[in-house]
Image: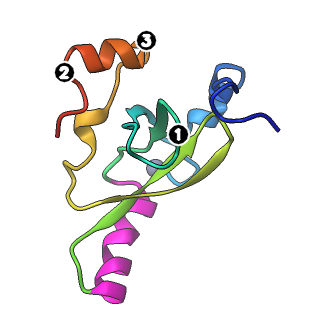
Amino acid sequence: MSSCLDAGDKTEQNPQLRICTHCNSRMLKWYTPPDMTWGTPYQYVCFNDDCPYYVRGWEWIKQQYNKEASYRHRYNPFVGESGPVPVWSPRALRGRIMQDDETVEQFVSRGGGEE
Ligand SMILES: [Zn+2]
């Protein structure tokens, strides 16, 4: 297994990996800032507000922590790992959504990533 930095984006070989396993929506390219622990330039996140994973998350966090928050389905295409990314509102994280054909450098230089 190679490190995530020199491994390629697995969805380029297999576009099916970009489909959310919870709602079958196509996930969006999402910039991961360098201060996050994943060590990836970007990942894919399901931004479908009807995704059952996201909808259930609000209820689950309310019950567990009595907080208004949820999580969205996230896929790391460099290592093939998926999991939750926490959100505190339906708008959260959307400022980091990238265009599919955009590089991280292009995204950052146009001011992307500002919340
Ligand atoms: Zn989904």
Which numbered disc covers residue 101? 3
Q: Position of residue 60 (x, y in %)?
A: 38, 79
Q: CA distance from mark 1 to mark 2?
A: 20 Å
Which numbered disc covers residue 111? 2
Q: Position of residue 111 (x, y in %)?
A: 19, 21
Q: CA distance from mark 3 to mark 1?
A: 21 Å
The stretch in magenta equals: 50-65
Amino acid type of the residue that numbered disc 1 sits on in the rendered structure: Gly
Amino acid type of the residue that numbered disc 2 sits on in the rendered structure: Gly
Q: Which residue is mark 1?
A: 39
- The secondary structure type at the circle numbered 2 is loop
**Which of the colour schemes (rainbow, by chain, secondary structure, one colour) is used?**
rainbow
Looking at the rendered image, the disc whose residue lies closer to the viewer, 1 or 2, is 1
Neighbor class of circle 3 (other Cα within 10 Å; few <14, some 14-19, many 20+) is few
Neighbor class of circle 2 (other Cα within 10 Å; few <14, some 14-19, many 20+) is few
Q: Is residue 103 left or right of residue 18?
A: left
